[in-house]
Image: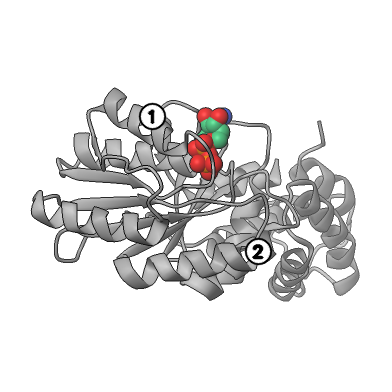
């Protein structure tokens, strides 16, 4: 594995004998290591650049106090900047709207949308005592609708009955109607993904959004999304104005740099993280923890 940033910066900066303010050249050398650490953590390049510029601005001229080593000081500046860019501490799902509150899940195929739908529905049902209806609008992947139904059965959450051959927009309308008639608090729409972003996918998302008027549009993305994170988050945000992001597979080896990329490019909060395949593997997003992880 890589040395953590603290060790690397200590090696560079702690040899400075002259105390006082950090000079531009001290900081530039340190920033090369910061840049390398962010790239290893999968942060997208344009975001790495804007991030290091901000750190430079904070660090150059900063007084090195005797009680703290210069390396540690820069690590703290980097950490604080990361936390600031990752956003505030907690962003719950917003249910503050007339029932049934619609939550639309979007993202690429395999990102973990269906699993995430089940996890969120389970939390809203068990912890928040809401009555939730889930509907799969994924008519492209065989068995996708069945997968959600099974998740519903396992977690005692209702799913919209499947009508073979019905198109996504019509399923969305039916789900909303059923949620109204059935007195549900929340209706969750699990949309179809594609292997990559394309125009038909985006048109489908816009159409679904237009008929369902969701209060939350959550982009579900794999934490291992590297350089693609910027394009992915930007595209979904531009076309269906997402309200938040859920990062999945945070139980893996990835450092989660996609969190910084997606937050920076959209300004939308990371609301939740997925930490496993099971329905209870759902956690709130904590910027400090992710900052530690990104820095290694
Ligand atoms: P979808 O195509 O976006 O609906 O993706 P799925 O929900 O079907 O998930 C694809 C695969 O990723 C499945 O095998 C899930 O069990 C797995 N998966 C989803 N979320 C997580 C997670 O947070 N951690 C891990 N390890 N696996 C996950």
Q: Is residue 294 above or below residue 25?
A: above
Q: Is residue 130 left or right of residue 160?
A: left
Residue 279 tag number: 1
Q: Is residue 169 above or below residue 58?
A: above
Label 1: element kind: loop
Question: Which residue carries the number 2 mark?
Answer: 198
- Mark 1 or 2: in front is 2
* Residue 33 on image: x %, y %: 85, 53
Mark 1 or mark 2: whose residue is earlier in sequence? 2
For image coordinates 57% across by 46% down, the residue present is 290
For image coordinates 61% across by 69% down, the residue present is 235
* Residue 14 on image: x %, y %: 84, 50
Is the C-beta separation of discs 1 and 2 under 8 Å? Answer: no
Q: Is residue 32 left or right of residue 134?
A: right
Q: Is residue 44 left or right of residue 201?
A: right
Label 1 vs label 2: CA separation?
30 Å
């Amino acid at each position: 594995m890589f040395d953590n940033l603290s060790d690397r910066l200590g090696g560079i900066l702690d040899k400075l004998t002259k105390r006082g303010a950090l000079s531009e050249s001290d900081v530039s050398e340190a920033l090369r290591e910061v840049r390398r650490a962010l790239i290893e953590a999968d942060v997208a390049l344009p975001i790495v650049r804007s991030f290091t510029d901000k750190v430079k601005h904070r660090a150059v001229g900063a007084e090195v106090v005797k009680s703290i080593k210069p390396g540690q000081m820069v690590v703290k500046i980097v950490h604080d900047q990361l936390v600031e860019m990752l956003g505030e501490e907690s962003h719950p799902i917003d249910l503050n709207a007339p029932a049934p509150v619609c939550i639309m899940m979007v993202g690429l195929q395999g990102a973990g949308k269906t699993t995430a739908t089940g996890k969120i529905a389970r939390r809203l049902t068990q912890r928040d005592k809401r009555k939730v209806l889930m509907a799969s609008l994924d008519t492209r992947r065989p068995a996708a609708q069945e997968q959600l139904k099974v998740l519903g059965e396992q977690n005692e959450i209702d799913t919209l009955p499947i009508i073979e051959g019905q198109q996504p927009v019509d399923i969305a309308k039916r789900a909303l109607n059923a949620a109204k008639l059935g007195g549900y608090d929340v209706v969750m729409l699990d949309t179809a993904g594609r292997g990559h972003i394309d125009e038909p996918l985006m048109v489908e998302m816009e159409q679904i959004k237009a008929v369902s008027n969701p209060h939350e549009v959550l982009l579900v993305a794999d934490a291992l999304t590297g350089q693609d994170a910027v394009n992915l988050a930007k595209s979904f945000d531009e076309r269906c104005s997402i309200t938040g992001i859920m990062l999945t597979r945070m139980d893996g080896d990835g450092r989660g740099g996609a969190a910084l990329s997606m937050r920076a490019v959209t300004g939308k909060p990371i609301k939740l993280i997925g930490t496993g395949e099971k329905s209870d593997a759902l956690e709130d997003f904590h910027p400090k923890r992710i900052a530690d992880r990104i820095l290694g």
